[in-house]
Image (cartoon, rainbow, N blue to C red):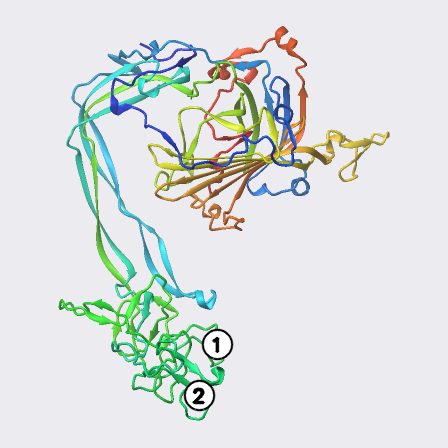
Amino acid sequence: MGLHQNKLTIFWVTFVCCWLFESCAEPETSEEMATSGPTTTLGSENIGDGSNGLVDKYFYDFDDAINATFFMYGGSRFDYTYDKYRQIFNDDPPPMTMANFPDHLLNVSPDSTHFLTRYTIDTLVVGGDTVTSEIGKIVPDSVQLFSSQFKNLESIEWDLDAEPSLQRYRLRNSDWVQADTMLYYSDTFDVVAYWAVLDTPLIQEGILFVDSSEWRDTSYSFIKDDPIVFINNFEFERTQLSSDSLIFRINTDCNDNNEWDGAEEGIADYNGDGDNWDVLVESIDNMDYNNDGDMEDIVYEFVDRGNGLLDPAEVYHDIDGNGEFDLNEPYEDRNCNDRWDGAETDDVGNGMFDDTEQYTLVDVDGDGTEEKKLYLIGAVPNNLLVNWNNPEDPVVMLTVELGDNLTDRWGNVYSDLIETVNFIDSKRQDIGDIDSMVTLYTRQVVGHITDENRQPDDYYITKTEWTTSNAGDVRRHYNYQIYSQDQHVNQLVYPSYFLPRGFYWSPNQIQNGFWHKEFLENEILYYTYNGLLRDGEQVDTAYYDTTDIATYYIEKTFQVETSQVTLPAAKVKASDNGDGTWTCYRDNAVVTDVDNCARADTTFLDCFKVTHLLNMTMMGSGVEYGQRSYTWLAKDHGIVRSEVFLRWTEHPLDESLSSVFGTPDSLGQIWVGYSRLDLADIDIERSGNVFRQLISPPRTVHLNELGVLPDFDFEPYKLSNQSGLQTIDFRQLTP
């Protein structure tokens, strides 16, 4: 049979069991509320400053005929003012138009589930070729194995630009290193094909939109119990910190004698505080502790042990070259007293009580016996390295390169502080050995609404149109928005989720960086209280959404506040001078054509500012994606300004858009302006009263009829990521 027909089919499915192949069902998605008692003001009668207004007056009454034009500011021009844009380009910003279709309602009507019946295809005609069912079909295939990613350590550099207490070594790494290989094999399996209007596993409940002019094919593979095993060993040379980890060491040899010592011996508890640890200043305490008749002594309650040597001055890096130690200069603290010490003239201690020296047990010579090494390993690489290769002139190692060595004060040599090692990264991948394959050809699913409370004719359609230009390449774009209203204002959308790195590798694949559910879902656009927008309204929701890709933690915030906004939206732009010229209101320019005047400002005083905040966290990786929009709704004008901001903690392709760049807000988050719409003009033809609908009722259309109707310019409905009137195309965010 032929696979091309022109009939359009939309039907309602209440429930269908998935009984054919359990393994072929769609990935289950579960939502679990993650917060108890989220913030909501909908149950409160009095909130904010008491300001409120009917949402139909501030958003849109879709029974009216609405035509609006907005100025678009996107990308690098997001922060442009109207005047700045005209100054640079000598023209108005590019427009986006929005229009609704009051003479059309979206209708979905119930139908039968007999469309699920499957029919065997004995011979499938594709183009000029004939493909028949085969027994024992041999199919060449391949599998690509990837090694683990790593970076080579190229050098270590001391950060002199940081505050002295925060100075440490920075590791300078190479780009990511990764290898891959392609392994080829052949698989033998049975093949059978069917056709049906719908695939049973796709359907659970709700309203399903089906395009009967398009086919999709889905193949179900039945796998043998024993997989095909592929193993590959990737061989690498890697440069890394040596096992000595000198930059992470914390010195515990606090008398600098290269020997382990117990706690210093107490002498007398001069101040009677129960310990012998104090260093006492007689002149400050007004007490002659040692009874020598001199009140100017510093008295130790313990033996401040030296090391039997006259120690040279602690080595430091002379930043300003003045030959003297300054407090901002890094130094080697050999005696643990957190201050720089000059050369000794007498063998003295460190001026503080030293407890039993801590140590790390290390089998240095590999004889099976662990020796005490007078250091601990810390988490911060702030141990300043000093090379005592020349004891008369020790040198601070601000930079460590590959192959550098170090000799400590006691002659111990540490070779290859950055070492080169050979290692093998073994990767295994099990591939299912196909026993048989079933291919099912079904109609293309346009959308799916799972809200069982939806009525079949409660949907209104709007359409936005705009153009983009890149290097002279002007492209036209459009999108449909579907709204409904019950207790709140709703928008039907395809929920979108970001993918982690590894699912895409180039800007051409960025559309795969965000994936969409196959089913339309009802998303509340504006929460209302009995149909009212209210100052101070806030609704917070949070839940875990478990998908086949990952588990996402979703947080949403909705807020309303009274506001005002000034926009270049005046309908009257100039005054007629009566001599064939016009004086522009905005800049007093005199022109012969009023269309050459810039638009004058209009201030909308009666507004509500609505904030939508979405934060999505991929559990496990911890990567966050944020989407924040501000929408100003003016009475009798609908949307007059819309701003969308985006943020990533780890942008998939462009680090300049990640949260490591830019100025953080009060929460430490960095947002990038994506798109701003400013109202330029609006024309609303009021519906009048209910008699208009009785005399000229709206025409009922199906979602997949849009592409064949002239009223919609023969442009079909398509998948997109929407936020109100804004269409978010993530491909525009590629480098």
Q: Nearer the viewer, residue 618 or 473?
A: 618
Residue corresponding to mark 1: 326
Q: Is residue 273 left or right of residue 100?
A: left
Q: Is residue 650 visible in this depiction of the protein?
A: yes
**Neighbour class for label 2 at 10 Å: few (<14), some, many (≥20)?**
some
Image quadrant containing the N terminus: top left
Vertical comparison of 568 with 705: above or below: below
Nearest the camera: 150 or 673? 673
Q: In this image, 579 relative to 711: left or right? A: right
Q: Position of residue 107 (x, y in %)?
A: 49, 13
Residue type indicated by callout 2? Asp
Q: Nearer the viewer, residue 687 or 578?
A: 687
Q: Residue at x 35, y 16 (%)?
A: 15
Closer-to-camera residue (215/570): 570
**Label 1 neighbourhood size at 10 Å, few (<14), some (14-19), many (20+)?**
some
Where 338 falls versus 281 (above or below)?
A: above
Q: Position of residue 584 (x, y in %)?
A: 78, 35
Q: Which residue is mark 2?
A: 288
Check disc 1 and report its element: helix, strand or loop. Answer: loop
Tell me where residue 398 appears, x and y as whole percent. 39, 70
Residue 97: percent from the left, percent from the top?
A: 61, 27
Q: In the picture, residue 436 is in which quadrant?
A: top left
Residue at (73% x, 33% y) in the render: 596
Distance Cα–Cα, label 2 vs label 1: 34 Å
Q: Quadrant of residue 202?
A: top left
In the displayed orientation, state which residue is furthest to the right.
578
Going from N to C along the chain, the mark reached first, 2 or 1, is 2
Quarter location, residue 496: top left
Q: Amino acid at mark 1?
A: Asp
- Tell me the number on the disc at residue 91: none
Q: Is residue 96 visible?
A: no
Q: Secondary structure at mark 2?
A: loop
